[in-house]
Image (tube, rainbow, N blue to C red):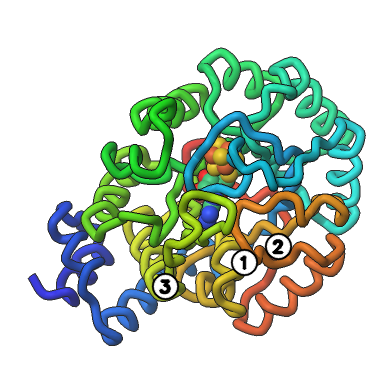
Amino acid sequence: MKNTELIEKLYGGGSLTLDEYTCLIAEHDESDCELLYQYADEVRNRWYGHDVYLRGLVEFSSCCKNDCYYCGLRKSNKKAKRYRLTKEQILECCHEGYELGYRTFVLQSGEDDFYTDEKICDIVSSIKREIDGCAITLSIGEKSYESYKAYFDAGADRYLLRHETADFEHYSKLHPPSLSAKRRQQCLYDLMDIGYQVGTGFMVGSPFQTAWNLAQDMIFLRTLKPHMVGIGPFIAHSDTPFASFDSGTTELTVFMIALIRLTLPKANIPATTALATIDPRGREKGICAGANVCMPNLSPLDIRKKYMLYDEKVCTGDESAQCRACLQRRLESVGFKPVVSIGDCACWNESNA
Ligand code: SAH
Ligand code: SF4
């Protein structure tokens, strides 16, 4: 089948095989992209119109016990600056976010055992108690079923855990032997089972990645059916084993965003900070190709430069209010409207109707 036929097939609700995804990802020209973006834009509008959900991100700890080869926070990076926010500081970020209009807070960190399950549950339930009607997303890595369940019972609504790559062999090239794709994927199924709105995703252009690997990611997404899919380009961090690898491109990342929009029409798809880091108009390009979520930073200014997953990360010098205003301008410049309602995934609304 020709690429245009494959795109038409996806748009019409059909599904592609692994080989069809691989061909489309490996080789596409400008007119394929144009058609794909037009359809992705249309499908996003069908479910979300021109609304872009804003979620306030609080990066509350830069300490991590893991050693992912790509990440600046990995434990072997002795140059990384480590910090931990107290419960009071985290609450303060959320209150400040509330004043700026945010109603969803994403709490992200390295895998840091300092925050015991008890501490996480206390933080989650305190935010829920103090900020009426907000939603809380956790993104704190791989935990046991019981831990995930405890956070959920304490009030956490959503969980973000990227599968990073669906291919087991590729996964083992990006991580030390102590981490496995099997375990990572099991965590995602556990989260779905507990009843979270689940976000997963991967890096585009990570070392050793092939078009076939990306096609496997698409098949994995279709199987898991997460409520959210966050993808961004891999960006080399100079103090990691992958320092000399090329970063992912805007073109392929935006192409994958559009493919995800057609594959999972109702999913929440963020235009990520990593995309904005490799391209000054990356966020806008992502939104125009089917993304519908942005996650501006609410972390205190003095710690932002210490949460360095990759080099040259943008928005580390702006106050939360500046981030909010800048994003508003950017979204409006391409005809979109930032909204701060809780912003459930369209399929979630449906299943709870
Ligand atoms: N520790 C948690 C959450 C923080 S890391 C976890 O690993 O799930 C959040 C995401 O940042 C990771 O899932 C990874 O996809 C992304 N990331 C890490 N290093 C990166 C890099 N060098 N370039 C782009 N994204 C990166
Ligand atoms: Fe830790 Fe997450 Fe970075 Fe891996 S990606 S080293 S788990 S912060």
Question: Can residue 280 be seen by looking at this rendering?
Answer: yes
Question: Can residue 160 be seen by looking at this rendering?
Answer: no
Mark 2 Cα shell of 10 Å, populated few (<14), some (14-19), many (≥20): some
Upstream in sequence: badge 3 or badge 1: 3
- The tag on residue 339 is 2
Distance from disc 3 to disc 2, alpha carbons, whole Å, reads: 19 Å
Q: Position of residue 155 (x, y in %)?
A: 70, 26
Identify residue for label 3: 42
- Per the image, label 3 sits on a secondary structure element best described as helix
Give the image quadrant in which the ligand numbered 2 is located: top right
Identify residue for label 1: 51
Q: Position of residue 177 (x, y in %)?
A: 38, 29
Q: Find the residue positioned furthest to the left.
A: 1
- The tag on residue 299 is none
Please indicate whether residue 264 sits to the left or right of residue 113 in the image: left
Please report contact status of discs 3 and 2: CB closer than 8 Å, yes or no.
no
Name the foreground residue: 67 vs 141.
67
Distance from disc 1 to disc 2, alpha carbons, whole Å, reads: 6 Å
Name the foreground residue: 197 vs 161.
161
Please report contact status of discs 3 and 1: CB closer than 8 Å, yes or no.
no
Please report contact status of discs 1 and 2: CB closer than 8 Å, yes or no.
yes
Residue drawn at the location 68% of the way across and 78% of the way down? 330
- Per the image, label 1 sits on a secondary structure element best described as strand
Upstream in sequence: badge 1 or badge 2: 1
> Image quarter for residue 284?
bottom right
The amino acid type of the residue labelled 1 equals: Asp
The amino acid type of the residue labelled 2 equals: Val
The amino acid type of the residue labelled 3 equals: Glu
Q: Position of residue 94 (x, y in %)?
A: 84, 44
> Image quarter for residue 28?
bottom left
